[in-house]
Image (cartoon, coloured by chain):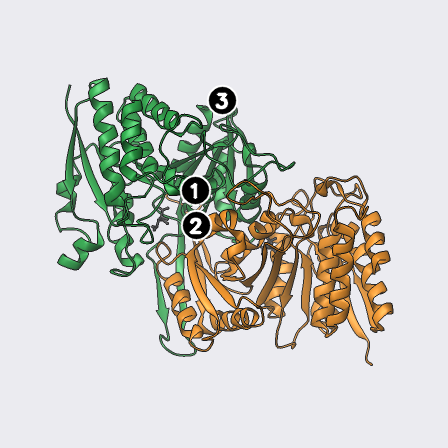
Chain colours: A orange, B green
């Protein structure tokens, strides 16, 4: 069968530490399941690259990685070197747009061996599997626009505006994807994040499209909450949720909050999908470059490895995905003696955890 | 001394149930501390009023309540009667703007007798006082703009835009207020909510103004977090925060999430302040009209009563504020035998709780 070419971009900070473990486990999965994977490494899309070249990407970045089957991504951003809005808009956010990765998928699941910081109403701990949701985020428009500017700059009258943009095409395609994900799951329950009571032009539109799309999915139970009370519900009854769909900004917030409610952002994965497969999809952990712990070799590689599992699934290898997930869960299982990085209360290194998951596989 | 005239607007749903308890306790405080309070009741700013009159407010609403010293507000909104964006923009959001209530203050404090749904890292419960923050929200501009519209309506090419607007005046005045609040508290710690890495026009401007304002407050410790990870930190380490300032939308989100982390939104208060006192300030609980429990007499009145305490403080009666707060805490204290509404695990009625607080006072 044809080789799958994976563009590897480790990026900044702990991206460089967790990526080798991700690749280690991907290679183990490839050999076990006989998957022809080829990893091509790229040094751009990092703040070090920016410091050398004055830009985040080479001019021909699209030629270099646009033909790959997927992008395996670490983390980007190092504010002391390059302001975030420069580094991110010059790389990750550009990939999302130029490769039309219009769906961002982020599972938030309470894993074995992880203590959730949110407890039940009676104070008792939540159990593995009790929180199990998928955040589906619009990834190419909405609040992340580049339209706007500043007037009377530097004066008392200064005024800054920025446009939120929602298109029928952009909203419908992510809603359709979210409904499909909901339909594929046992609970078939979709929650829409809105704020139509306050953001009274774009958000009522979002609500309208949800109502419209729901007509095509009578088997899916739909509800909606305003984003403010929705964040409260995530904390108070995270077990209520199944699939949650939100705009670019609301999806961003919920896909940090959801994983936070399940214990650690250090293990949450995300997939930036171009479902048409005209362009490569990009798989990145939710955690960032983490300047505070970078260089210490203690970052948790599970997010990177979990992303890898999602990538295998996307490439058509569901069994390999499941095997990697089982290996992660086996290592996390309390009493398994599996190594744990400091964020999970242990003292193991990044590589210890990567190797343990490789062995479990 | 001159009588303080309070405009009372109970509004919709449980607003009508908690308001009498708020007034009961305010009257008790007024008689105890010899405060000349006069309550004038208004039936507008409710969806029932809309059904009768086709608008949320009478034409002369400004004359009717603009001369009052404060507005004591219940809740507004009843989606089955009037769409939220109509009822809210026609009342509450209009008051905020027309009375230039540019600061929204929302304390989130873990109270005695309330179990927080967020636990410590080791799984042990958080203790009263351990979470004690104040959210300071910009209340008149930002993401809640009325600029925008729809093009190619009803077609596949449909596109909807909405402007976020930040002005130097609008941003600086709320930041100044937030810095002052931070300075007045023991920890002198101010956190700014941003999203300058994604919302790359308005939010970097917000950050700039924070840096600028911080120069005038060298005694205040300042930090900033992007809203996504900030919501995660609220769950994982709410004890870290002291004063948190955010734009209209981010403040809205954080001031539901903060109270949610302290156990219940049913007891959280908020103050919409016009610090110049040119117009009345408005005091309202964070909870809404709660159609699901309205009419049952089981809504928790503590948010309404706590708001009343903030109102007394705003009118210059600090001692009365403190006494009301102590009465609330006395009734909540475990083992006090104080009545509890169902949201706090009890079976008491709204009036039971109101009377108990009145007696404790
Ligand atoms: C009802 C709604 C428009 C309002 C807001 O978003 O401001 C409410 O959530 C609040 O926080 O007071
Ligand atoms: C780094 C940032 C621009 C990005 C986003 O907001 O999309 C990140 O938070 C994410 O969720 O992938």
Element carrying mark 3? loop
Is the residue indicated by label 2 positioned so its CB lies within 8 Å of ligand 1?
yes
Q: Quadrant of residue A282?
A: bottom right
**In front: B104, or A40?**
B104
Residue B280 visible from this viewpoint:
no
**In front: A103, or B239?**
B239
**Dot 3 or dot 1, earlier in sequence:** 3
Residue at 73% in and 50% down: A12
Of discs 3 and 2, which sits in the foreground?
2
Mark 3: give few (<14), some (14-19) or many (20+) Cα within 10 Å. few
Please report, as a chain letter, where disc 1 is located: B
Q: Which residue is mark 3?
A: B186
> Where is residue B263 drawn, in percent x and y?
46, 39
Residue at 17% in and 59% down: B51
From what the image shows, is residue A243 above or below residue B70?
below
Cα–Cα gap, marks 2 and 1: 8 Å
Cα–Cα gap, marks 3 and 2: 28 Å
Cα–Cα gap, marks 3 and 1: 21 Å
Q: Is residue A334 left or right of residue A136?
A: right
Is label 3 on the same chain as label 1? Answer: yes
> Where is residue A199 drawn, in percent x and y?
38, 56
**In front: A306, or A288?**
A306
* Quarter of the figure with the N terminus of chain A: bottom right
**In front: B193, or B346?**
B346
> Where is residue B137 drawn, in percent x and y?
40, 40
Check contact, mark 2 vs mark 1: CB within 8 A: yes
Is the residue indicated by label 1 positioned so its CB lies within 8 Å of ligand 1?
yes
From what the image shows, is residue A319 above or below residue B212?
below
Q: Which residue is mark 2?
A: A228
Q: Which mark is residue B103?
A: none
Q: Which residue is mark 1?
A: B255
Mark 2: give few (<14), some (14-19) or many (20+) Cα within 10 Å. many
């Amino acid at each position: 069968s044809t080789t799958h070419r994976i563009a590897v971009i480790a990026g900044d900070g702990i991206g460089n530490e967790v990526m080798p473990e991700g690749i280690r486990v991907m290679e183990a999965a490839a050999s076990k399941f006989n998957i022809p994977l080829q990893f091509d490494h790229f040094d751009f899309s990092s703040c070090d690259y920016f410091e050398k070249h004055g830009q985040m990407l080479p001019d021909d970045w699209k030629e270099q990685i646009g033909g790959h089957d997927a992008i395996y991504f670490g983390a980007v951003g190092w504010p002391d070197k390059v302001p975030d809005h420069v580094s991110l808009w010059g790389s990750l956010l550009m990939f999302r747009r130029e490769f039309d990765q219009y769906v961002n998928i982020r599972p938030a699941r309470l894993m074995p061996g992880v203590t959730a910081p949110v407890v039940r109403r009676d104070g008792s701990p939540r159990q593995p599997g009790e929180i199990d949701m998928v955040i589906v985020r619009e990834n190419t428009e909405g609040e992340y626009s580049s339209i706007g500017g500043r007037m009377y700059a530097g004066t008392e009258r200064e005024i800054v505006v920025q446009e939120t943009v929602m298109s029928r095409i952009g909203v419908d395609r992510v809603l359709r994807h979210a409904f499909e994900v909901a339909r594929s799951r046992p609970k078939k329950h979709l929650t829409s994040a809105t704020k139509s009571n306050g953001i009274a032009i774009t958000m009522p539109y979002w609500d309208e499209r949800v109502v419209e799309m729901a007509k095509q999915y009578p088997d899916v139970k739909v509800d909606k909450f305003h984003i403010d009370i929705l964040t409260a519900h995530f904390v108070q009854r995270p077990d209520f949720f199944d699939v949650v769909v939100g705009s670019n900004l609301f999806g961003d917030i919920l896909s940090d909050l959801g994983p936070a409610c399940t214990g650690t952002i250090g293990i949450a994965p995300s997939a930036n999908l171009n479902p048409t497969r005209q362009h490569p999809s990009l798989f990145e952990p939710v955690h960032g470059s983490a300047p505070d712990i970078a260089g210490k070799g203690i970052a948790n590689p599970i997010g990177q490895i979990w992303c890898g599992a999602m990538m295998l699934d996307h490439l058509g290898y569901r069994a390999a995905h499941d095997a990697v997930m089982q290996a992660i869960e086996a290592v996390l299982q309390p009493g398994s003696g599996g190594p744990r990085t400091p964020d999970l209360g242990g003292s193991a290194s990044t590589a210890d955890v990567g190797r343990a998951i490789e062995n479990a596989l």
